[in-house]
Amino acid sequence: MADYKKILTDTMGTLVTKAKELAESEAVSNAVDRVKEAAVSTGIPEVYEKGIQRTKSFSNATRLTLDLNRDHAELDRIYTEIGRLCYEQMHDHPEGFFAPLFEQAEAVMATIRAKEEELQAYKAGFTDAAASPQDEIDDFEAVVNRTEDDGTAR
C-alpha cells in the first residue's frame, strides 16, 4: 500500500525547496531591488522595509509550519513502528493496560482474516464462472424447456 504520508511530506518538502530557490533567484532579487529603489525615490522606504519584514515573517512561518508537519508525520511513523514491534514482542503475554488493546487488535485481525477468506472465495467463484459460461446458458435453456413442458402438459 502506498505510504501517502511520505508522499505528501516529500511533495511538501519539494515545494518548500522550490519556493526557496525562487525567492533566492536573480529575477526576484532584481524585482525586490526595483521596488526598493521606487520606494526610496518616493520617500516611503519605511513602508517598503515593513513589507519586506512582513513577507519574510510569513515565509518563515510557512517554512516552519511545513517543517513541523513533516516532523509530526515522521514521529507518527516512528510511533507506529514502536507499537508494531511492541505488539510483536508482547502479543503472547500482554501486561497491564496493553491487554485490552491487544484483545482489540486480535479481534480486528480475526475480522480481517475472515473478510480476506470471503474475498478469496468470491474470487475463486469468479474464475470458476468465467471458465465455463456455456454451463450457465445450458442451465437457463433447461429451465426454459422445463417451464414450456410444464405449461403444455396442463
Image (cartoon, rainbow, N blue to C red):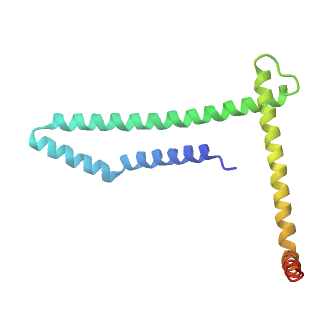
Q: Residue furthest bottom?
A: 152
Q: Does 61 sit above or below residue 27?
A: above
Foreground pick, 154 / 99: 154
Quarter occupied by residue 70: top right
Spot occupied by residue 139 in the image (x, y as percentages of width and height): 87, 75
Q: Residue furthest left?
A: 42
Spot occupied by residue 101 in the image (x, y as percentages of width and height): 75, 26
Spot occupied by residue 19 in the image (x, y as percentages of width and height): 41, 47
| Residue 120 as seen in the image, left or right of residue 3 | right
Foreground pick, 29 / 65: 65
| Residue 154 as seen in the image, left or right of residue 55 | right
Q: Residue furthest top?
A: 96
Spot occupied by residue 121 in the image (x, y as percentages of width and height): 85, 56
Q: Residue at x 62, y 31 (%)?
A: 75
Q: Does 44 sit above or below residue 31?
A: above
Figure disc tally = 0
Quarter occupied by residue 72: top right
Q: Residue at x 59, y 36 (%)?
A: 73
| Residue 9 as seen in the image, left or right of residue 33 | right
Rendered-image quadrant of the C terminus: bottom right
Q: Residue furthest front?
A: 154
Q: Is residue 84 visible?
A: yes
Q: Residue at x 84, y 25 (%)?
A: 90
Foreground pick, 137 / 126: 137
Q: Is residue 24 visible?
A: no
Q: Residue at x 73, y 29 (%)?
A: 83
| Residue 138 as seen in the image, left or right of residue 108 | right
Q: Does 7 sit above or below residue 80?
A: below
